Image (cartoon, grey):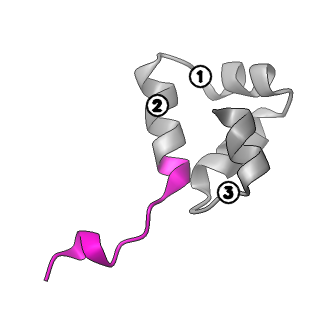
Amino acid sequence: MSTTATKPNHIGRKIARIRELRGMKQETLAEELGISQQSVSHLEQSETLEDDKLERVA
């Protein structure tokens, strides 16, 4: 059985990956979102996000 079928999407990892691909630091993303760098770190560690937070990041 494949582990991908049981493994949930980890939205925080995807946010971190896209940020890194764009050559952006957490501090820069935090400034653009109007939040602290620690908050960005917390978002990237979260498995799920509320829709309003996800829309702001997008």
In the visual, does 27 lie left or right of 14?
Answer: right
In the visual, does 45 lie left or right of 50?
Answer: left
Q: SS class of the residue under badge 1?
A: loop
Other-residue count near label 2 (Cα within 10 Å), few / some / many at <14 / 14–19 / ≥20: few
Image position of 25 with respect to 43: above or below: above
Specify which label sits upstream in the sequence, 3 or 1: 1
Q: Label 2, on which residue?
A: 18
Q: Label 3, on which residue?
A: 49
Which of label 3 and label 1 is nearer to you? 3
In the displayed orientation, state which residue is furthest to the left. 1
Specify which label sits upstream in the sequence, 3 or 2: 2
* Start-end of magenta stretch: 1-13
Query: Nearest the camera: 10 or 5?
Result: 5
Say which amino acid is labelled 3.
Leu
Q: SS class of the residue under badge 3?
A: loop
Image position of 21 with respect to 11: above or below: above
Residue 9 marker: none
